[in-house]
Image: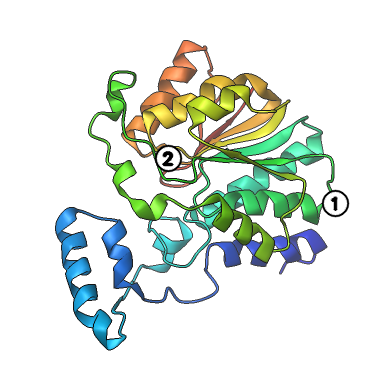
Amino acid sequence: MATDPAALYLDPLKKTLAFLLWPEPPVPLAWSRRQGRWPKRLVATALCGLVKPFGLQPALAKTPTAAQREEGQIWPGYADTMIGLKRLDNIQHCVETALAEGIAGDLIETGVWRGGGCIFMRGILAAHGVTDRKVFVADSFAGLPPPDPRRYPADAGDQHHCHDILAVSREQVATNFAKYGLLDDQVVFLAGWFKDTLPRAPLGQLAVLRLDGDMYGSTLDALVPLYPRLSQGGFCIVDDYALPGCRQAVDDYRAEHGITAALHEVDWTGRYWRKP
């Protein structure tokens, strides 16, 4: 059992963000209209239309295993993060190590969905009384971009932009920060496509860089401007290494820049390394 005051706060915060303290409840069937292939969306739309005049809202039962929920292998209905417990543990390890070793710089996540990973970063700073570092929250707040195969052939045919459930507004993310009491001037929002916002973002040094862009282009558009800002000994975390586009972008960047630091496994998709 944890006895350290910081751990007593951070452990339940992690589990709350990942909605692991409760069973995964049914989700409104209407949500299926915003994800999945078109036949599923079409059927969901038709059923919702049939029962709407009666004031009913059909729900879809979700029965993921405990392991799937803890490892972030589902798109959850109610959690504020989909990255699971192991990747939240990894964020805690990287941020707390950076604090303990005095690695200079702020924290950033590129691709935040409902904001859970960044909320946890801010919670870690709060738990340790850190007031001189910021958490940068970078996202389009409009979902993922359509693929640009002329610039990034590896993204040809990518369908992430079709999933409206991945589009969470800046206002909703800010509300999520606020409900945990963690919305303040140490939280900085960077709204827009990474290729437009990150090269000119008001950033200094970074201690932790967390990439969650899913695609080749979104991953590279974050790595190119941000990795040079990562301090020596800082952490570069990759959320989506299991996705071919992201993996290729990371491998290409590391090869081009001669990065040979060990790529450590977090779970089935998470990876990280320390900048030499």
What residue is drawn where x is 53% and y is 17%?
259
* Marks 2/1: CA–CA distance: 31 Å
- Displayed quadrant of residue 160: top left
Q: Earlier in the sequence, mark 2 or mark 1?
A: 1
Indicate the quadrant containing the N terminus: top left, top right, bottom left or bottom right.
Answer: bottom right
- What is the secondary structure assignment of the residue under circle 2? loop
Rendered location of residue 97, percent (x, y): 73, 40
To which residue does mark 1 refer? 129
Q: Height in image: 64 above or below 110?
A: below
Q: How many marks?
A: 2
211 on left or right of 230:
left
Indicate the quadrant containing the C terminus: top left, top right, bottom left or bottom right.
Answer: top right
- Displayed quadrant of residue 26: bottom left
Q: Height in image: 2 above or below 239?
A: below
137 on left or right of 78:
right
Q: Is residue 99 visible?
A: yes
To which residue does mark 2 refer? 240
Near-viewer residue (246 or 275)? 246
What residue is drawn where x is 14% and y is 58%?
39
